[in-house]
Image (cartoon, rainbow, N blue to C red):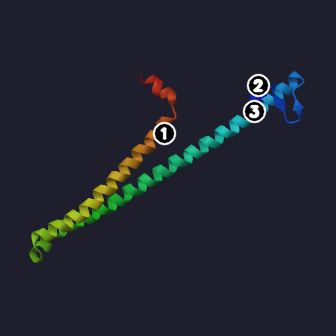
Amino acid sequence: MSRGAEAPHSQHGSVDTPAEAVGAVVESAAALVRAELKLAATEARAWLVRIALGLGLLWLSLLLTQVFALLVALSPALLKDQPWTSVGLTLLLSLVPLLGVFALALRELRRSKDLRHAHSPADDQRSR
């Protein structure tokens, strides 16, 4: 016979009295609470890591914005010595990583927002 079809068992054998049955239920409830707390801690840790990654990428994109702004400010001086294609290519090569990192930062921050809302079914039912 499978374990699910048998009468509940405690650690010491079969359940003979209502008090032992209540004790088994309390033990099972405590184990469930511990598992739920562990799951909540793991989900919170994953959410915090995703937020940290998004904010780190956002910080990096701000640094790259400063580099791009500096190159734009220096471009009139560079145009005196270099052809406009060289200066334009330099500006483009500094803009591409900026946009890429910024897009990654936004994606990570959106995903962290989605993670937070994915585990609240009551909010989903209220919005319908």
> In which quadrant will I find the C terminus?
top left
**Gap in Å between the C-alphas at discs 2 and 3?**
17 Å
**Residue 88 image-quadrant placement:** bottom left
Residue lying farthest to the front in this orientation: 1
Disc 3 crowd rating (10 Å Cα; few below 14, some 14-19, many 20+) is few
Dot 3 corresponds to which residue? 28
Q: Which residue has dot 1 on it?
A: 116
Q: Is residue 36 above or below residue 69?
A: above
Three-letter amino acid code of the residue under disc 1: Arg
Q: Which residue is mark 2?
A: 5
Instruction: Assign a secondary structure to mark 2.
Output: helix
Indicate which disc, 1 or 2, sits on the residue closer to the N terminus. 2
Q: Amino acid at mark 3?
A: Ser
Q: CA distance from mark 1 to mark 2?
A: 38 Å
Under circle 3, the secondary element is: helix
Q: Position of residue 119 (x, y in %)?
A: 52, 35
Q: Amino acid at mark 2?
A: Ala
Residue sitting at x 67%, y 39%: 35
- Of labels 3 and 1, earlier in sequence is 3
User: Above or below — where is 63 with respect to 86?
Assistant: above
